[in-house]
Structure formats: C-alpha cells, structure tokens
Image (tube, rainbow, N blue to C red):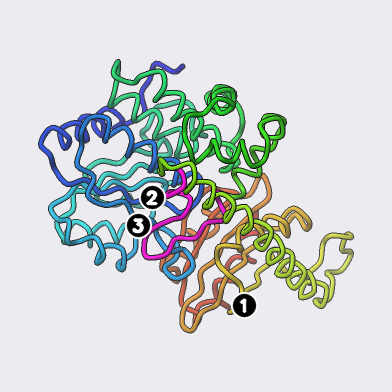
Amino acid sequence: MNKIKIKNLKEAADRIRLAVKNKENIILYGDSDMDGIASVVILQETIKSLGGNITAVAFPDRENDGYGINKKALEFLKSHVPALFITLDLGIANVKEVEIANSIGFEVIIVDHHQVLDSLPNAKIIVDPQQKDDEYPFKQLCNGGLTFKLCKEILGENLSENLKNSFLELTALATISDMVPQVDENRIFIEEGLRSLKNTYRPGLKVFLDILGQGEVVSGGYMKIISALNSAESINFQNESYVLLTNPSLQKCEELAENLLGKVTLKQFKIQQITQEVERRISQKPPARNASHNDVGGNETIIFEGDPAWKLTLAGSVASIICNAHEKPTFIFRKKDTESCGSVRSPKGTNSVEAMKTCKDILITYGGHPQASGFRLKNENLEEFKDRLNKYFNKV
C-alpha cells in the first residue's frame, strides 16, 4: 500500500471524530448509484460504531433533480442545521450549491473521486485524489474505495476484522460497478471483498446468495447483485438499495431483493428500446464521405440524442452501448420542458469532461470522469452545445 496519504484524508477523519465526540449533527448525502450508496453505508456504520449522531441520510432523485447536490435537497435538509454535511461520490462539481449550503449553515466535507473542474467548491474539507496538488499516486479509486480508506483513518486500530470485511464486500461491488481499472488497490479490494462476500453477515447481501445461489455468485453472478442494487431509484431522498443494505431483517431484505431483481428485467427492456430508437435515428442520417461501416451520423464527430420520454437513469447504459458500437463520444439526454439532463460515454483516449469545459458558459452543471460523465443545461442551448462539441472532437 502507498505510504503517501490522500490529501486531506487525515483532516477529514479528525473532523468527523471531533463531530462524534461533540455529538454534532451529521448528514450523509450520497450519489444514487452502487458506488455512492456503498460509500454512504460504509461511512454511516463507521460513525455509528463510534456513537456518532447521524441525523439524516439522503440521496438525490436523479430523474427529477439531476446529479449532485441540488437546492431541493438542501431545502429538505436545512432543518438539521447546524450540521456537518458530508457528500459522497458527488460534490466536486457543485460550486454554487456548496455556497448555498454554507449560507444555510452547513459545514461541508466533500468526499469525491470525480475529475476536478476549473474551480473547487468552497467546502471546509475536500478529499479527492484528482486534486492537482494531491500527491497520492493511485488516482483510479472508486468512491467506495476512497471512503474505505477514510474509515480506516477514522477508526484506526478500532476497525474490527468483521467490520473491515463487511466494508470490503461493499467496496468490491462498488469498484466493479463503477468500472474503474481493476489494478493496484482496486484489484486487492475486489479479491478480498468477493472472498468475504461468500460468508457475508450483511442480510442485504446474504439474501442475494440465497436467491441466486452461492455457487453462481462466486462464479460471476455478483454482476446480478450489482445490477439489482443499481436498479433502485431515489424517491423523497431515500433509496431502496440503501434500505436493503442497512436493514437487519432477512425477511424484509428478501422482499426488497426480489423487487430489485424484478426491476432489472424491466430496466434492460427499456434500455433496449431506447438503444434501438437511437440506432434508428443514426441510420437515417446520411453517412459521411468515405465512411467506414460504423462511422454513421453524417459529418458529426459525436452522437447527440435526446427525448422527453427517455429516463435519465437509463441514459448512461444507453450511451455505453452506442459509444461501444460506433466508437464516438455519445451524449444521451432526457429533454424536459426547459432543461435537459444527460449522460456521456466517450471512447478511450478522449476526455468528455475537458470537452464540456469548453462549453461551461452554457452549462448549468457538468462533470464526472473522462470516459463517463454527465451534464445539465437549458434547452435553448442544446444546438450550440452540440455544435461546440462537434468542433472540439473534430480537433482532437
């Protein structure tokens, strides 16, 4: 393991320990995918093991409110002020929203692993290996891995073997789910976490072993667990997968797991429908001169498609399929009345976040990873956004 620590990791751990000691209100606000949920559960159980006072746990409704911190969530949580507001797997792109949180009376700690934009939010502490002056050599941690390291820093010798293994199980699933490179520390997290998963004590994971069969899970069926946990949606700032992973009742967990496994089938069908529609639209555009078999969509260097009927929570999966098929940066979005919000997937060697930086004056929010990111903007700027992206990728 690396001897150099991630920047601000110790400072964040010290501040959280102090909040526990002083019985301060603590709020955990995490992204709604497997990585964000795992991060929340790991940190919540760490703080609770020390007797901390977590007054609220919340997740954004991606479908209606988009990614990251939003005003609606801050309004919902402001009754807990004063409080330590810890964001997990989001926050690094929320400059304006962190200012609002500060003005409300929150003290903000950001724990995120996404690419840093031009300016950092004015949070009390930021833990993100992507910060320019962070000397930690391994930059490819998922947020679950980052949170695991934070919790080791918080607990030190008080991290029991059982708790460590329970956290590693979640970290392994988060690492696989977030599609970060399975090398270095990530490879260790996966190996140790999946080994522990076979004998998990967590009811919310144990029921999957019972339903799917332990043999199938060990031989690769863990992807079915990840798909199920990623199929949940956040409603009223709560998330069904979070409830499953923190519920002590095997009976209740079995009901929740069966429900999520059922949602996977429906989700896959809807993804297929949207993908077919995108392919139909692409096929109707005249091919560029001297185009190869997969170089469709006219002279455009990107694929840029949206629709009011498409769910934002499916956009990333659709964009991945289309990007892999056509080897072009792919922007798939849900077009609402006045705004659009979408997901981006970009081929290796390209950087979608850098591309969107050139459009930041017309974007409400954007950010993520070079090959997997998201955005939100006013509909009146869609065509200009598309034109600028085409020009950017035409040059690189």
Residue 103 occupies which quadrant of the picture? bottom left
Q: Which residue is mark 3?
A: 94
| Residue 84 horizontal side relative to residue 37, left or right | left
Q: Is residue 182 visible?
A: yes
- Judge left or right: residue 119 versus residue 316: left
Residue type marked 3: Asn
Inspect the image, locate mark 1, and give the three-letter code of the amino acid beneath it: Asp
Query: Alpha-carbon distance for marks 2 and 3?
Result: 13 Å
In the rendered view, tell whether residue 119 sits above or below residue 300: above
**Which image quadrant for residue 125?**
top left
Instruction: Please say whether residue 243 is one of the residues in the magenta stretch.
Output: yes
Which stretch did the figure color magenta? 229-245
User: Which is in the foreground here, disc 1 or disc 2?
Assistant: 2
Q: Which residue is mark 1?
A: 307
Q: Can you give x and y, in whole percent of width and height, for residue 59 in the image?
A: 38, 56
> Which of these two is toward me, 25 or 349?
25
Residue 30's disc number: 2
